[in-house]
Amino acid sequence: MQWLNTTAFAKVPVIKASGATAQPGNVGVFAATGPGSWTVNMNFGKTFAIGERLKFMVRADAFNAFNHVNLGDPNTEITSATFGRITSAAAARGMQMNARMTF
């Protein structure tokens, strides 16, 4: 997915002898940001009393419960072939269950 207008950027000349840039660039830090992200985590649990002192708890957790795609940040390396593109995404939905007995 193309996120940045790559024609709005130009490479800064590099001095061949030292490998350093001939002049500083004028793009500020955090000038290019990626898309926002959101995720919904859920958990459900139930505690069962077994006698006076014994309790049993069962719990289920869901991370990114709605399985919403959260895209990564765009590639900001101007010499890269994928400059301005988003090539990554966050992990998909994850779930876990656990049980606990207290006495």
Image (cartoon, rainbow, N blue to C red):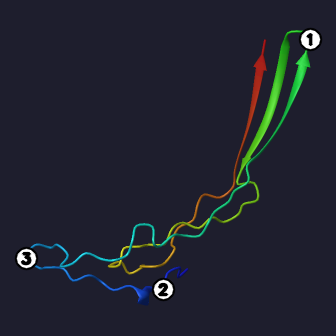
Occupied quadrant, residue 60: top right
Q: Where does the image place residue 45, in percent across and percent down from the top left?
A: 83, 35
> Is residue 33 toward the left or the right of residue 82 in the image?
right
Occupied quadrant, residue 9: bottom left
Farthest-out residue, bottom: 7
The tag on residue 5 is 2
Q: CA distance from mark 3 to mark 1?
A: 81 Å
* Residue type at tag 2: Asn
Q: Residues within 10 Å of mark 1 (few under 14, many from 20)?
A: few
When the figure is inspected, residue 35 is found, relative to residue 10, above or below; the finding is above
Q: Which secondary structure, mark 1?
A: loop
Query: As rendered, which of 50 and 22 lies closer to the eye?
Result: 22
When the figure is inspected, residue 74 is found, relative to residue 66, above or below; the finding is below
Task: List the residue tagged with mark 3.
Answer: 17
Q: Residue at x 70, y 54 (%)?
A: 64
Query: As rendered, which of 24 and 63 lies closer to the eye?
Result: 24
Q: CA distance from mark 1 to mark 2?
A: 67 Å
Identify the image quadrant of the C terminus.
top right
Q: Which secondary structure, mark 2?
A: loop
Q: Report if the CB atoms under discs 1 and 2 are less than 8 Å apart.
A: no
Farthest-out residue, top: 52
> Is residue 16 toward the left or the right of residue 51 in the image?
left
Q: Residue at x 76, y 59 (%)?
A: 66
Q: Residues within 10 Å of mark 3 (few under 14, many from 20)?
A: few
Q: Residues within 10 Å of mark 2 (few under 14, many from 20)?
A: few
Query: As rendered, which of 14 and 93 lies closer to the eye?
Result: 14
Task: List the residue tagged with mark 1.
Answer: 51
Q: Of circles 1 and 2, which is in front?
A: 2
